[in-house]
Amino acid sequence: MKLPTIRLKTVRRTSHPWIFQKMVEKPGRLPPGSVVDIVDREGTWVGRGFYNGHSRIALRVLTSDAAEDIDAQFFARRLQQAVSLRRDCLQLDSVSNAYRLVHSEGDGLSGLVVDRFGSLLVLEFFSAGMYRFREAIQEALLHHYPGSRFYWFAEEHVQKQESFDCREPDLPPPENIVENGVRFRVAAGGKHKTGFFLDQRDNRRRLADFCSGRRVLDLCCNSGGFAVYAKTLGKAEEVVGLDVDEQAIDMARQNANLNQVRIRFVQADLFSWLRSAIAGGQHFDVVVLDPSKQTRDRDAVNYALKRYLDMNRLAMQITRPGGVLLSCSCTGLVGETDFLEMLRRSAWQVGRTLQVLQISGAAPDHPFMIHVPEGRYLKAVFALVW
């Protein structure tokens, strides 16, 4: 069957899968997420992928092989590659029964994220095209993980931008997972809709190395990932977890109970709690600061950096001299260079010095293509605070 053809306004000089509206000659009316052939200004065929005339990202290129159709077999092949990376190369089944199975552009499937939590597979859609192929995607995943249950969703702003209606199934019951021998209870569909921050797996394990016999503070603790690691594997003397979200604190307490450890979780605003604790002379040996994404808007990057600056100034003040600070940012629009400069400014403003031990990112089940740097979003800086 002949596909609709979309013509670019220029010659294509990049292999990045995103092509924006301003680079595309508008065709006739096509349903959002239609599979199309793509030609450049001179009529040369350059790729095949999804077209969406309602989205800022008009084209998502999925293949540059003219012989490769975008059909159920295409998704079976790409998902086979994604599963093989996690199981055969990274050997994650020996570490955890929870990991990211598909990381969008990092696995050649722009607009799709899949997380595995035991027998539950959670699909997040970022494009109308991927949502249209959801049944083929689920069928291919069942081939590798038979008997799995599915939950899927798309954020409201994505549905609006991509002009599609994602009808979520009923919420699944919570699932228990194991990661490096530590147990967690995962509830999909809540504040963090996929259920758990899998990208911090290796950073959680690394943090535990600093915690033996020490006093640990986990700021923006969410469901308690760093806090539980600090107490179980890290053998910390005392752990305090702080988050403003009541549901997150409730899940964090459940996770502490699952591992039979005592952690003090506090529901409070980070800024007011830290200012009060600093005024009271409190200090911690190890401090984790892992706030939520600060902006999705390129025009608000300076605002996001100001928020990070304010949070890190307080986090550094409550860290004892020679103590460890792990400062994280999952805001993709904030690059590593700008994040490090923000940390330098934070330290200077409060009269402290940072000795950086390690700069990390997302666990390797969150790969990124070298020609798609947007996939490298997580910054995790381990430093001593002097």
Image (cartoon, grey):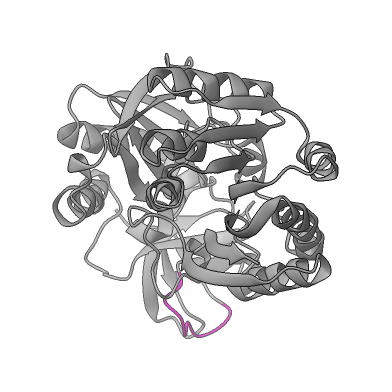
Residue 24 in sight here: no
- Number of marks in the image? 0
Q: Residue at x 72, y 50 (%)?
A: 318
Q: Residue at x 45, y 30 (%)?
A: 152
Image x and y of residue 174, in percent: 42, 17
Residue 262 is a magenta residue: no
Residue 302 in sight here: yes
Answer above or below: position of 249 versus 219: above
| Position of the C terminus by quadrant | bottom right
Image x and y of residue 358, in percent: 47, 68
Image x and y of residue 250, in percent: 58, 18
Using the image as rendered, state which of residue 65 and residue 184 is in the foreground: 184
Left or right of 134? Residue 145 is left
Q: Residue at x 68, y 26 (%)?
A: 266
Left or right of 272? Residue 291 is left
Image x and y of residue 270, in percent: 76, 39
Q: Please, what is the dominant secondary structure of the magenta stretch?
A: loop
Using the image as rendered, state which of residue 165 and residue 187 is in the foreground: 187
Answer above or below: position of 280 versus 28: above
Quarter of image, res 269: top right
Q: Residue at x 48, y 36 (%)?
A: 225
Magenta segment boundaries in residue numbering: 9-16
Using the image as rendered, state which of residue 352 and residue 6 is in the foreground: 352
Using the image as rendered, state which of residue 280 and residue 234 is in the foreground: 280
